[in-house]
Image (cartoon, rainbow, N blue to C red):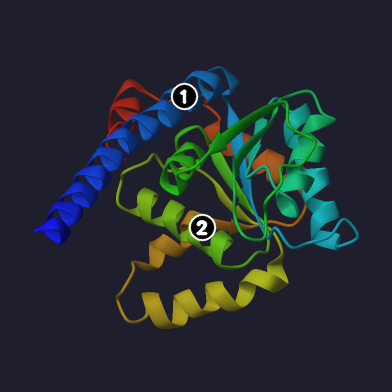
Amino acid sequence: MQEKLQRADMAADYSAREAWRLFGIMAEFVEATERLEPLRPAVSIFGSARLKPDNPYFQQTEVIARKLSDAGFSVISGGGPGVMEAANRGAFHGKSAAVGLNIELPREQHGNAFQNVALYFRHFFARKYMFVKFACAYVVMPGGFGTLDELTEALTLIQTGKTPRMPIILVGAGFWRGLTDWMRVELAAAGLIDPADIELMQVIDDPDEIVAAIFRFYEGRGFSPSASEREGMLYL
């Protein structure tokens, strides 16, 4: 009997913790929305946390972020080291905000020092939502599983109409060629995706052309989401 009571107490305790966890999730959504909404237009930059400052991709990211910042875009990164730090560093020294969406991970346990706006998340999916909701473009640098996760999620959301179409720019032609070729040969040829889905991505290495490509995409319509687009984003 005592063992049954202990199990019941444990189940009740777990249920209570789950209920309170919902309030924590709500708090993360509310705080991030309030702080990020005024910073539009923004560009999210993804890439490896493992790259060091002497890596050419790290240096290229910093240049891209600085040019985006000077062009009027807030730059959103994951707030950690590697490409995230390079993105924040470039934007921090530019004219617009450097935003870090920080989370504690085994290899990225510290935020970088180049954040005008630093948000902290315990829940991975709440953090990922903010990368999507407030970006008008994605710049994807070379990276590992996390970077591929962000890229494929962005492609899926646009492909399925859950978010408006926007520029997805892959940086590092040599790095991404194998993946894009595989998508054409294996996915599109087998009918698993439409051939046009490949065109959701652009491969651009020149920092000035990256900025120009984003402006070209929004020419004539502006960066602000339409009323219908805002409504659709409520159901991500």
Q: Circle 1 is placed at which residue position?
A: 33
> Where residue 151 is drawn, which disc sits there?
2
Mark nearest the camera among 2 and 1 is: 1
| Residue contact between numbered discs 2 and 1, judged by CB atoms under 8 Å | no
Image x and y of residue 32, in percent: 50, 27
Identified by mark 1, the residue type is: Thr
User: Does residue 167 lie above or below 56 as drawn?
Assistant: above
Image x and y of residue 79, in percent: 67, 42
Q: CA distance from mark 2 to mark 1?
A: 22 Å
Query: Quick one: quadrant of the N terminus?
Result: bottom left
User: Does residue 81 lie above or below 197 as drawn?
Assistant: above
Q: Nearer the viewer, residue 217 or 135?
A: 135
Mark earlier in primary sequence (2, 1): 1
* Residue plotted at (55% across, 20% down): 35
In this picture, residue 202 sits left or right of residue 196? right
Image x and y of residue 65, in percent: 75, 40
* Residue plotted at (48% across, 23% down): 31
Hey, which residue is sitting farthest front in the picture?
2
Q: Secondary structure at mark 1?
A: helix
Residue 49 is drawn in which quadrant? Answer: bottom right
Identified by mark 2, the residue type is: Leu
